[in-house]
Amino acid sequence: MALLPDTFVLSRSMGTVGSWPQLVVRWGRGTVLTPTSAIASTSAAAAATATSAARAVRPTTAVVGAVLLCAGWARTAERRAGGRRRQVHGATASALAPRVARRAFPLGDGAKMRLFLDTADEAEWDRLLPLGFFYGVTTNPVLLERAGLPCSLETAERLFKKAVSFPGIQEVMFQAWGASTEKLVASARNLQRLPENLGRVVVKLPLTREGVRAAAELRESDPSCKLCMTTCYSATQGFVAAGLGADYIAPYLGRMGDLGMDGIEECCSLQATVGGPNGDVWRNKSAEPGGANTLTRSLRTNTRVLVASIRSAQQMVTLAGRGLDTFTFSPKICDELLDVEATTLAASDFERAARAAGGG
C-alpha cells in the first residue's frame, strides 16, 4: 500500500459520502473528506494529485473536488479490500466487508425507501412478508390486542424470531409499555435484550413527558439503542425527536385527518423540520393541483419520518412525491399496492399467449 505524503494529517470522522466510511484530510484552513478505502488503495502520485488540486481552490470547493476525484478510486478499492483492515499513517481504516448475498434493502443508509408492515397478525405476515419488499415490521399494544396476543416480553421474543426469518426484514418495532418513566425504561431495556437482536429491535416510545424522559435515559445508558418516537400529531414534535437523536418519528396521518387537520401538510412540515438522512421535501406553494413545486432543504438530522396511520395507497404516492420515504401500513394498503386490475389482466393475457404458442 502506498503511503500518503507527510503533509497530510489524518483523523477519524463520522462523515460519509453515500455509504463510504471517511477520513478527514486537513491542511491549513482547508478540509477534504476522502473515502478511506480509496486512500488505502490509491498510489502516492494519485493522492498527491488530489492534494495539489485541492490546495489550489477554495476550501468549500476542495471538499467537493477531492470527493469526486476519489469516487472512481473508491470503486476499485471496494473490489480489492476483501474485508481486510488497513493502516494509514497509524490510523486504522476499515475496508469494506466482503460481498454478501443481495438483500431487498442493503444494511445502513444505502437504501433510501423503507417500507414496514403494520400488523401483529401472524397470518398476514405469512401471506405478505415472503414477497420480500418490506424493510421491517411495526407493532404496538393495540395491534397485539387485535391479533389476540398478550403484551408481554415472551410474545415479543417469539414475534421477533419469526419476523427476522422472512427475507429482507432488518428491523422489528415493539412499543414499550408502562405508565411511568421507570416502567417504560424497564420494558424498553427488556426488549433491547431480546436474543439475537443485533441492532434489529427498534423500541417505540410515546411523545409524552414520560416517554421523552425514558428515551433520554435509554440513550444515555446505551447510545446505540434504536428508538422510534410515536404518537406524533404535530410537526413541532419533530424538534423533540431530533433533539433526542431518535432514529424515527411516527406521525399519525389518518388520525390527523380524523381531527380535522391537514395530515399531508403536517407530515411534509415534519419532514422539512427533521429531514432525516435524505432530508429534502417538495412543496406546492400555489396550493393548486398541478401547481409548481419548490424544493425545500431541511435540517438533515438522523431522524427519519415514519408515516403511520395511512388510509390509502394514494396518500403514500402523494407523500413520496413530496420527499418522504419511510412508511408503515396495514395489510389492506399492501393489497391495494399489489392488486391492480389492469396489471392482472395484462399478465393473464401474456400467459394465454404463451400457452397458445406452446409455452405449456
Image (spheres, rainbow, N blue to C red):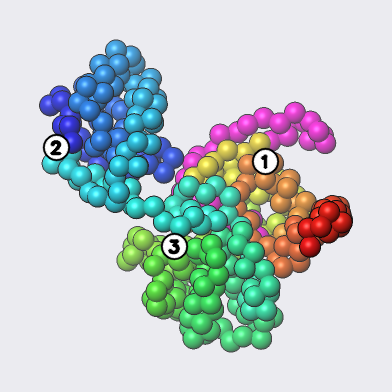
Query: What percent of the width, then of the height, locates residue 313?
Result: 76, 55
Q: Is residue 174 magenta?
A: no
Instruction: Tell me what residue is drawn at x 29 percent, y 51 percent.
Output: 83
| Residue indicated by mark 1 | 322
- Which residue range is magenta in the image? 283-308
| Residue indicated by mark 2 | 89
Of helix, strand and loop, which one carries label 1?
A: loop
Residue 123 is at least partly visible in this image: yes
Question: Foreground: 113 or 258?
Answer: 113
Of helix, strand and loop, which one carries label 3?
A: strand
Query: What percent of the width, then of the height, locates residue 277?
Result: 49, 45
Q: Name the side, left or right, on which 281 lies relative to 42.
A: right
Query: What percent of the width, then of the height, locates residue 175?
Result: 54, 72
Residue 258 is at least partly visible in this image: no
Q: Earlier in the sequence, mark 1 or mark 2?
A: 2
**Residue farthest to the top?**
56
Query: What percent of the width, then of the height, locates residue 63?
Result: 35, 26
Q: Which callout, 1 or 2, points to the residue nearer the camera? A: 2
Q: Earlier in the sequence, mark 3 or mark 1?
A: 3
The CA distance from mark 3 to mark 1 is: 26 Å
Residue 215, image quadrant:
bottom left
Question: Foreground: 15 or 165?
Answer: 165
Where residue 70 is drawn, which disc sits there? none
| Residue indicated by mark 3 | 226
Q: Which callout, 3 or 2, points to the residue nearer the camera? A: 2
Instruction: Tell me what residue is drawn at x 22 percent, y 49 percent.
Output: 85
Query: Crowdedness of circle 2 by 10 Å Cα count: few (<14), some, many (20+)?
Result: some
Q: Name the side, left or right, on which 134 lies relative to 342.
A: left
The CA distance from mark 3 to mark 2 is: 34 Å
Query: Crowdedness of circle 3 by 10 Å Cα count: few (<14), some, many (20+)?
Result: many
